Structure formats: C-alpha cells, structure tokens
Amino acid sequence: MANLLIDELTQLVVAALVRAGASRAMADATARALVAAEMAGLGGHGLSRVQLYAQHVKEGRASGAAEPRIAHEKGAACLIDAQGGLAYLAMELATREAARRAREFGVAFCGVTHSHHCGAIDYHLAPLAEAGLIGIGFTNSPAAINAWGGKKPLFGTNPIAAVFPRKGKPPLIIDLSLTEVARGKIMVAAKEGKSIPEGWAFDADGKPTTDAKAALTGSMAAIGGVKGVLLALTVELLCCALTGAQFGFENDSFFEPGRPASIGHALLAIDPGALAGTAAYEERIETLLAAMLEDEGVRLPGERRHRLVADARVNGIAVADALLRQLRELAA
C-alpha cells in the first residue's frame, strides 16, 4: 500500500488517459472526478475505473477527441451533446449552464446525451451547492433492473443524487443507486463461489436467487420492490426520453465487449431565493437537521464523505500496490 498526494495521483490518471487517446481537457476533467471519488471513499467510482475508461477510449467505445456542445436550448433548459466522449467534460458544461440559468430564471434543467458513465452524481452537483443552489441529478446506465413482473433487465441502476447548501457548513449530500446492492458485490461473490442474500437479485427466469452466477445472467432487485422499479423508470425517462439518449436495454454492458455508449444524464438546479427566500430556506433546513441530530445515533448524509475528503487533502490517498502498478503501466 502506497500513499500518494492528490496532485500526484491526479497527474498519474491524466497521463494514463492521455496515453489511451483522450484529449488533455477530457483527461483532466475525468481525473479530477475519479480522484475526488477516491477521496470521498467511493472506490467503485474512483481509480478502479481508470483501466476501463482507458480501454473504452482505445477501442472507440468512448471518443477521446469529443468536445461537448450545447445542442439545443430554450430559456431555463438546455441539452448538452457529449459527442460520445467520456462524461466528465460534458457534465462540467451542464453544471455551469445549470448554475447560470438557475441564477437567471430561478430554476434550470440541463440534459446530457450521447454520453458515457458519469461516476458519482453528487460530484457534479457540488459546484451548484457552492453557488448556493440546490442540485438534483440523475443518470441512466446499462440494463440491470427488470420491469415489475418481467424477467428481462430493461432499466439501469439509475442513481439519484441531491445536494442542499447550508450557511457556513458543508452541504447535505444524498446519493443512492436504485438497486438493493451494487453489481460489483455480486461479481465478487460469483468469482469467490459464494452465495448472495435473498433479495439482491433474480435469475434469468425472473425468480429470486441466492446463486451469484445465476444473478449475473438475470437482473438486479430494485430498492423497495415495485416502488424502486417505478423510480428507475422515472429516471430512465428523464435521462433518455428528454435527451434522446439510449435506454438501459439499448446500451451494452460497460464490462463486456460492445458498442459505444449513449447514456443520458440530467441536472436540475433550484435557487432558494426564487421561492420562500434564501434566509427562509437556511432556517428551515437547519431546523430539520437539528431535529434529526437530537436522536442519538443519527448521522447526516454526506457527513462521512466530508471527513474523508478533508483528511485526503492533508494526508493523501492510500492506493493498493496492484492498483498503483496498473495505473503506472497505463501511464507509461
């Protein structure tokens, strides 16, 4: 295990992506996001993704030369075309546009189309909170969840995130996937020959299974049963029907050979000053959070991430030896 400072690790990721064929701007934006995820303790959206992203750029499943652009706009709404590239440059543009339009109109909705995996959604919302705006984000992904009563995976894991700014304090962060468990945990169980708890997944016949290998050929269980499935459907429509991106079942798995991705994302920004007013918003959110914390054992969403990020800024990030070797080989 080696400890690397943030700047050193970021430049290593940049070098790996540039060597794979990504533009410097795309590599910079992607590296910042992946390292930020690692800082926050979100390894599944961090350095472990570098090899996959580099491979997709090399194979043409993601365009390393893509330059995102505004494809359509009307008042408080706009559509960003990621041009088939890695998602992070397009998401930076979407965040800037959402902030600008929300300040002008009080609310803004920015969709992103023809995109790739965008990592931890709350990362893209952080600049909105820094600007005093509420941010809500959505993304679809390759198929993992079947329609209620069906057998075939149609909807992605379709994460939802939200950030709520606070006066003089770090924002409240909410970020969740709509499956009971991350697919990665099932992949690990299958590799190790272990069973999985009932309620995590279904087999190819749509029946609940504890067999990890059978789960990988079936579908993932949505949180809350039919309610989670309907949330996944809602995200699919927001991210794809509005943006023209491909639905989960139309995208190939990121982890198997396939065609270029065409994922959709969506950001909603809200200016509290446009409604009851910033002062009222700040009083109301603190009243609720204070009530929550009166109950011993309650931890505010995002609290752990804030602590981890603060520590990483000072002490750097511990990287497993095998992963560090992989990154260095990709960058060489």
Image (tube, rainbow, N blue to C red):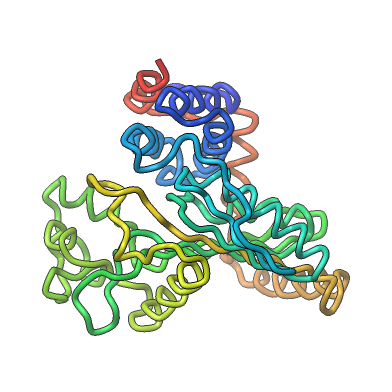
Please state the horizontal and vertical placement of residue 75, each as a whole percent of the image: 74, 69
* Residue sitting nearer the eye, 87 or 205: 87
**Quarter residue 228 falls in:** bottom left
Image x and y of residue 108, in percent: 70, 67
Is residue 30 positioned above or below 174 on the image?
above
Say left or right for 12 vs 330.
right
Q: Position of residue 211 (x, y in %)?
A: 12, 62
Q: Residue at x 40, y 55 (%)?
A: 262
319 over 76 or under it: above or below:
above
- Image quarter hosting the N terminus: top left
Foreground pick, 312 / 35: 35
- Pick the residue in front: 105 or 138: 105
Q: Residue at x 70, y 56 (%)?
A: 97
Residue 51 in view: yes
Q: Residue furthest front?
A: 71
**Residue 267 image position (x, y, % from top left):** 60, 63
Between 83 and 152, the one lying in front of the other is 83
The residue lying at 31 percent from left, 63 percent from top is 250
Using the image, determine if residue 8 lies above or below residue 295. Answer: above
